[in-house]
Image: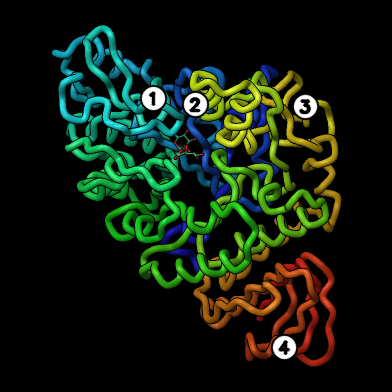
Amino acid sequence: RYPKKWWQETVFYEIYMPSFCDGNGDGIGDFPGITSKLDYLEELGIGGIWLTPFYLSPKIDNGYDISDYYAVDPQYGTMADFDYFIHEAHQRGIRVIVDLVLNHTSSAHAWFQESRSSRLSPKRDWYIWKSPDEQGALNNWESFFGGSAWEWDEGTGQYYYHAFAKEQADLNWANPEVRRAMKDVMGFWLEKGIDGFRLDVINFLKVSGEFLDNPVDEKGRQVHRYDQNQDGILEAIGDICGYVHEREGIFMVGEVGSEDMDILRRYSGSGLLDVVFNFNLGSQERFRPADLYRELQLMEDQHTSDQLPTLFFSSHDMQRHISRFGEGNTELEEQRAKLMGALMLTAKGIPFLYYGDEIGMRNHIAHRIQDMRDIQGISHYEIALKNGKTEEEALSIARAKSRDYSRSPMQWNGSRYGGFSEAAPWIGMGPGHERIHTEAQREQPDSIYSFYKKLLSLRSRYPAIAAGEYVKLERLTGDAIAYTKRSGSDEAVIVLQFGSEPLRLDLSYWSDKKLEMAAASDEIVPIGGSLIEIPPHTAVVWLS
Ligand code: TEU
Ligand code: CA
């Protein structure tokens, strides 16, 4: 029963490099720290790790601004530390995929330095430059971090384009030399034994050659019509993927920052990316079971047979789902966190668990601008001040834009810095860290951690959960979602009872097989025969 493609049955765990474990006591996570926690991940039942960028970087955007694609940032360790980490992960049967930023480089990268040195530089065309009188110069394109996406370069009298910070210059993917250089980068890391790539903002690689102004919607927000998802992008992605897929078993997951299934599904499948992140399901702001159900159904309807969805509800760019969905109610928070965990680990798709969600880490809030670390938050703060807003108003804008919420240090124990480090961490600790940590939850049979661990163990033993196809997928009364999955003759029935009233069910409707309850996040009451009553906010898994 070995899968043809390992990643189809793997549960991934996202590690935000600076925040997982500090091995050398400087308050910043690193490879020696991560390696020391591999036993923890193995015990939890993780099969793959997604590492956020660890390459040499000025870290304007925590490594999404790479200045040397062939070096490990000294804050994260040495190349030998990286090699040892890969070796130790593989020893435990854990695969590793690395985050790669192909869309832009740091402005400190030698390529950009060369490009900006002269209009005649052989690398001038590696980036996107415009003279003030050229069509499209200073069009209305906005940077995601606020303000114009064009930065003036005094030395050569032209603007360059940056979709993110001005220290993240966009590469010109219309230039074949850029493609070749990036394939070399990928080849280098593949030789080092990594198992795949997470490709950052991969739908940004091409911008429209005409540089027309983007439309603006009725709320004044920019619609990214000409700077994302442009013609020719699938050819470019197909080219990279073809190169990588020449080696067997390498996994390619792309970040296509969209909630629109019509856009998302263009990017994966035969000859393209293996999968893309399904923001349509993951990024919901409010807890609405009806919306979750609708998106699950949409994924089922719209994906072709060679497209598998991904399942995630938190990331280093999103707020933690326990805080997003918990409505500030302590009891509800934990119940919904377990329900979302159950959905992520049992629905059809590839789960990406974000570090700390397995213990229900809450959103970290920077109360003062001095405590804010994210460039997106800080840069919107500065722009707001420039636009005449008060400090208080600017702070509230910055808070809405900041991605610090989910980036606080992993909570390993109840000590001052959570066992993450002996020194003060680079970012503040999450709320309740004295109480919410792995050490405590491993001992508690009803903790979020124990529930995750149990489901992960079930997944690894029952192909119906890990790789089954839906036989039924339904929304029930009382805000419940239920599905039956089948693989061979094995069946799993999963009921996610999101509602606040007890729910009566006749299990024989869901399966004609004899079912055994395998896991539940609360007590289930048998009523007699195949009738049962599921209490509010409960997830249950039955197996045949
Ligand atoms: O994210 C792309 C992206 O679209 C988000 O940063 C988006 O702007 C944000 O979530 C809105 O709140 C990727 C990385 O995941 C992110 O961390 C990087 O900052 C970004 O690319 C630039 O490399
Ligand atoms: Ca460190």
* CA distance for labels 4 and 2: 52 Å
Q: Establish whether ligand 1 lies closer than 8 Å to the Cβ of label 2.
A: yes
* CA distance for labels 3 and 4: 49 Å
* CA distance for labels 3 and 2: 23 Å
Q: In this view, does 339 lie above or below 428?
A: below
Determine the secondary structure under disc 2.
Answer: loop
Quarter of the image for residue 479 reads bottom right
Residue at position x 69%, y 40% from top? 363
Determine the secondary structure under disc 1.
Answer: strand
Labels 1 and 2 touching (C-beta < 8 A): yes
Does label 1 or label 3 sit earlier along the sequence?
A: 1
Q: Tell which of 96 and 533 is nearer to you.
A: 533
* CA distance for labels 1 and 4: 56 Å
Marking on residue 61: 2
Residue bearing the label numbered 1: 168
Kind of residue at badge 2: Asp
Kind of residue at badge 4: Asp
Determine the secondary structure under disc 4.
Answer: strand
Residue bearing the label numbered 3: 417
Residue at position x 43%, y 34% from top? 144
Does label 4 or label 2 sit earlier along the sequence?
A: 2
Give residue 322's position: percent from left, percent from top.
Answer: 70, 50
* CA distance for labels 1 and 2: 9 Å
